Image (tube, grey):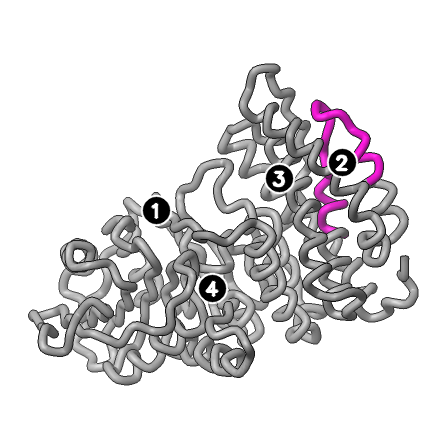
């Protein structure tokens, strides 16, 4: 992976080689760590784990589980409380989290921050140390974790968020919508300002896109390997609602930052496509592929009128061929998926159709990518990772397509 000229993104050293966090007596060396509500046992676990990960480092540990009369202080760790913000889905950080963190950083004179999401007590001491080391010792503004995940985990990020963030903002972080993050003070202030801009809308807890904000500010970004972590489930939200919320928020951010991303460069070089895996007749993956391929055929029959308002003829023809393919050869090429997503981004910007209907029509196409991912990976982590990188590479390669369509949409009308 090459470095972006806009935001420097690279993988940190393996956890076991992470250097210890540098201790200092400076009044502005305090690291603020904001925890979600974890309960008394979870809070105690995090106190012990942070103490082991950051020996000698001045830390303020903020938790909504701490009442004012229970605040405490040791030589290096101060435990403080803060009011819990508005309730929201716990599967990611939202605008209110960044606002609270920036306020706490100012109050406690912190020079760096870590925001940890739901079930943060599943993070290891080594993972916590890796994030803290990066933000305190390496002149980094935004450190985003990369967790050790299975081949079927975080597929919305793999199919959509990671490729778009890399191609348009030059930041190749695999989880651009973070559950945990480490920030410099100026990054925290930047994200708080972005959160305030979003706070006037109807949505009380909108999503903020830290990697994009860092990129447009020419801030330094790192992706840090932090090992395993429990990933909270989005709750009762169905896939249609979840994808519409996430894609709609990202598309809105892309629209707002169009002058920037039309000039920036992506950070991933071309990846040669691999051959699809032949799935055995009794595998669970083949059963899923069959069911999802059949579902796509139904979606094609029901949604081609909407898709025809968004997609050019060559993409519609490719989707027709895909709808007729047997499960054993069902495969959406990465370049087709990239162009489809870019066409949806443009239709969102132009309000070609109602945005709610538009985002709903994206779901079956995303599931077609997932079906292809199952064929490509066959449950193998290495093959899964390769297909994800092929997808990201295709978005980078096809970026001139969306730039041209954005500037001259009438020339490309379906």
Q: Residue 297: which disc?
A: 2
> Is most of the magenta stretch helix, strand or loop?
helix
Disc on the earlier residue, 1 or 3 = 1
Q: Quickly name the residue at label 4.
A: 221
Q: Say whether residue 278 is left or right of residue 84.
A: right
Mark pair 1, 3: CA separation: 22 Å
Find disc 3 in the rendering and name its residue: 370
Residue 349: name its quadrant.
bottom right
Q: Is residue 163 above or below residue 142?
A: above
Q: Secondary structure at mark 4?
A: strand
Residue 402 percent across, percent down from the top left: 77, 61
On screen, 329 above or below 22? above
**Nearer the viewer's eye, disc 3 or disc 2?**
2
Closer to viewer: mark 4 or mark 3? 3
Q: Residues within 10 Å of mark 3 (few under 14, many from 20)?
A: many
For label 1, the crowd category at 10 Å Cα-Cα, with few meaning under 14, some 14 to 19 and many 20 or more, is some
Query: Which numbered tag is attached to residue 230?
Result: 1
Q: Earlier in the sequence, mark 4 or mark 2?
A: 4
At 59% from the left and 66% from the top, the residue drawn is 249
């Amino acid at each position: 992976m090459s470095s972006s000229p806009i935001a420097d993104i690279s993988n940190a050293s393996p956890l076991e080689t992470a250097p210890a966090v540098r201790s200092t007596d400076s009044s502005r060396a305090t690291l603020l760590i904001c925890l979600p509500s974890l309960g008394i046992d979870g809070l105690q676990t995090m106190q012990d784990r942070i103490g082991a990960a950051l020996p000698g480092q001045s830390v303020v540990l903020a938790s909504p589980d701490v009442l004012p009369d229970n605040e405490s202080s040791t030589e290096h760790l101060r435990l403080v409380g803060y009011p819990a913000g508005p309730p929201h889905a716990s599967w990611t950080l939202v605008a209110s989290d960044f606002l609270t963190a920036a306020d706490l950083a100012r109050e406690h004179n912190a020079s760096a921050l870590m925001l940890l999401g739901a079930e943060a007590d599943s993070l290891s001491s080594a993972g916590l140390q890796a994030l803290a080391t990066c933000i305190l010792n390496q002149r980094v503004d935004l450190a985003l974790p990369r967790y050790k995940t299975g081949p079927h985990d975080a597929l919305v990020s793999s199919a959509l968020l990671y490729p778009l963030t890399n191609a348009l903002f030059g930041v190749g972080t695999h989880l651009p919508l973070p559950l945990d993050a480490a920030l410099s003070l100026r990054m925290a202030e930047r994200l708080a300002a972005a959160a305030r801009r979003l706070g006037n809308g109807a949505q009380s807890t909108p999503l903020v896109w830290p990697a994009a904000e860092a990129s447009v500010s020419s801030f330094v970004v790192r992706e840090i390997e932090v090992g395993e972590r429990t990933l909270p489930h989005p709750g009762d939200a169905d896939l249609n609602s979840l994808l519409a919320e996430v894609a709609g928020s990202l598309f809105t951010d892309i629209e707002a930052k169009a002058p920037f991303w039309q000039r920036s460069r992506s950070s991933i070089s071309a990846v040669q496509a691999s051959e699809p895996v032949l799935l055995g007749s009794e595998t669970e993956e083949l059963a899923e592929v069959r069911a999802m391929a059949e579902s796509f055929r139904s979606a094609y029959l029901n949604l081609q009128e909407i898709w025809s308002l968004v997609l050019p003829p060559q993409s519609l023809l490719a989707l027709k061929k895909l709808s007729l393919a047997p499960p054993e050869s069902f495969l959406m090429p990465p370049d087709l998926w990239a162009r489809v997503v870019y066409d949806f981004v443009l239709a969102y910007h132009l309000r070609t159709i109602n945005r709610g209907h538009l985002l709903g029509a994206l779901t079956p196409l995303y599931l077609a990518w997932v079906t292809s991912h199952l064929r490509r990976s066959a449950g193998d982590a290495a093959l899964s990772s390769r297909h994800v990188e092929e997808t990201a590479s295709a978005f980078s390669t096809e970026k001139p397509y969306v730039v041209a369509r954005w500037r001259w949409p009438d020339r490309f009308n379906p």
